[in-house]
Amino acid sequence: MEYNTQKEELKLAEYGRYVQDLVDHALTIESKEERNKAANAIVQIMTQMNPGFKGNDELQLKLWDDLFIMSNYKLDVDSPFPKPEPKNDSPAEKITYPDQGFKFRHYGKIIEDLIDGARKIEDVEEKKALTGMIANLMKKSYLNFNRDSVNDEMIVDQLKEMSNNELEFADDFKFQHTNDILSSSPRRTNKQNKGRSKRKWKK
């Protein structure tokens, strides 16, 4: 299993690992049109995570600024606000999240938040683009939970269940190959496994 401590430190921790992963993915999109769709979808997800920002231009500006900060100011997209200049940012105010139960624990609460946010997106193409990113994040999370096997059809079925069949994929959507995901996620050694087991049962 890949621990968050093994990953690069989050730029803005209040948005969580998966929003950072979405931003990192957006940086790899070659088409600017598709990057714009991804960026707008991510900002909508960030808005859903903090509903008080909706409809407030000043707060929306902060979300776009945060998006650029999470990309190390490298994201080339058409923003409705001027792109901020790199600077020493003070720690962002921590966002409080509601404590609610969720069914698929191996995906984490953030995945459910992303799905809930995607369901509220009105633009069909943006919604499909975000659905594809969420599906690949679900696959990566599942492989972190169980590296032995993963079934793409199962991921699709679970995404449909979690979204009440409200999310659809783009016609050209393809899952990231399992080997590509595993090669980027270091396997925990037997020594680490034993250490984790001792910590778990130590009283």
Image (spheres, rainbow, N blue to C red):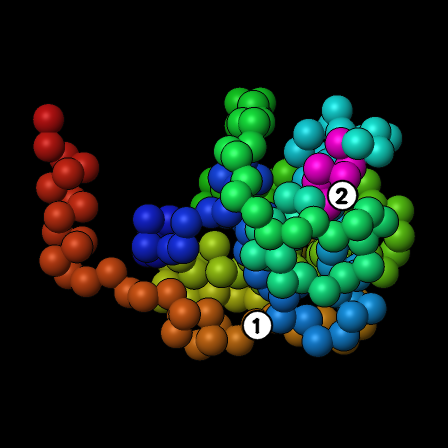
Q: Which amino acid does the dot numbered 1 rest on?
A: Gln
User: Which residue in the rendered view is the most extreme toward the right?
Assistant: 123
Q: Which amino acid does the dot numbered 2 rest on?
A: Gln
Q: Quadrant of residue 112?
A: top right
- The Cα atoms of the two marked residues, 1 and 2, are separated by 24 Å
**Are dots 1 and 2 in contact, CB under 8 Å?**
no
Circle 1 is placed at which residue position?
176
In the picture, measured across the screen, residue 134 lies left or right of residue 122, that is: left
Kindly state the secondary structure of the residue where label 2 is placed: helix
Residue 45 image position (x, y, % from top left) = 71, 43
Residue 157 image position (x, y, % from top left) = 64, 56
Q: Which mark is residue 44?
A: 2
Residue 146 image position (x, y, % from top left) = 38, 58
Would you say residue 60 sits in the magenta stretch?
Answer: yes
Quadrant containing the N terminus in the rendered view: bottom left
Say which label, 1 or 2, has the lower sequence index: 2
* Callout count: 2
Looking at the picture, tell me which residue is in the foreground, 87 or 53: 87
Question: Secondary structure of the magenta portion, mostly?
Answer: helix
**Relative to 37, is 177 above or below?**
below
Residue pictured at 16% horizontal, 44% vertical: 197
Kindly state the secondary structure of the residue where label 1 is placed: loop
Residue 68 image position (x, y, % from top left) = 65, 52
Looking at the picture, tell me which residue is in the foreground, 57 or 27: 57
**Relative to 28, is 113 above or below?**
above
Start and end of the magenta stretch? 59-64
